[in-house]
Amino acid sequence: MPYYNPFGDYPQIGKNTFIHPSAQVIGNVVIGENCFVGPNAVIRADEALNGKVSPIIIGNKVNIQDGVIIHALAGTEVRIHDNVSIAHGAIVHGPAVIKEYCFIGFGAVVFNAVLNPWVFVGHRAVVEECEIASERLVPTGIVVRDQILQKLTESKRDFILKVNTMNVYLVEKYLKK
């Protein structure tokens, strides 16, 4: 549910976006169109620096699954571009930028990082204090801090597209209830 933060900021939610009733969206959060926010997800922009809360900005067709946490340190922001999928139990903590068609696996953590387009972060991986080049695969369970990563495979690219397509389909179905 959308809530004000202590500084009076209220979330802005785009058209055709589904937010599960148990999800919490708090403060200076902007969510685009055709997004899915699953059960028990928390998107919280409430830490102020000099009285101003930096935003969490989420693009269009973004899939935020069950139990995901998105938050940012005071004075930093989170920007999630279009067509991103964030799987169950993942944490994205700002400062962070996640660009188009990225996938963040179950229980993964992204903190103080930039993910360029088509990055696949494996389950339980940690990406911290670095920028990941486009079309890279972060293996399951690895901790990445400015390492060289292998090129994204076609099957992983197809997986990202499949997850994104299903997200848009689910949003349409939930909103038709």
Image (spheres, grey):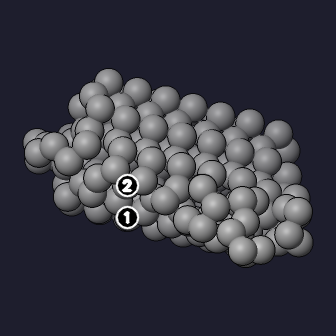
Q: Which residue is mark 2?
A: 113
Q: Residue at x 77, y 74 (%)?
A: 51
Residue 49 pos. (x, y %): 68, 69
Is the residue marked by circle 2 packed among few (<14), some (14-19), or many (20+) residues within 10 Å?
many
Residue 149 pos. (x, y %): 14, 43
Side (left or right) of 173 relative to 145: right
97 or 15, nearer to the observer: 97
Residue that protrudes farthest toward the front in the picture: 50
Q: Which residue is mark 1?
A: 100
Q: Nearer the viewer, mark 1 or mark 2?
A: 2
Callout 1: helix, strand or loop?
loop
Position above or below: 133 against 106: below
Q: Are marks 1 and 2 in contact (CB under 8 Å)?
A: no
Give the amino acid type for the residue marked by disc 2 in the picture: Ala
46 or 31, nearer to the observer: 46
Position above or below: 157 against 134: above
* Mark nearer the N terminus (1 vs 2): 1
Position above or below: 96 against 38: below
Is the residue marked by circle 1 packed among few (<14), some (14-19), or many (20+) residues within 10 Å?
many
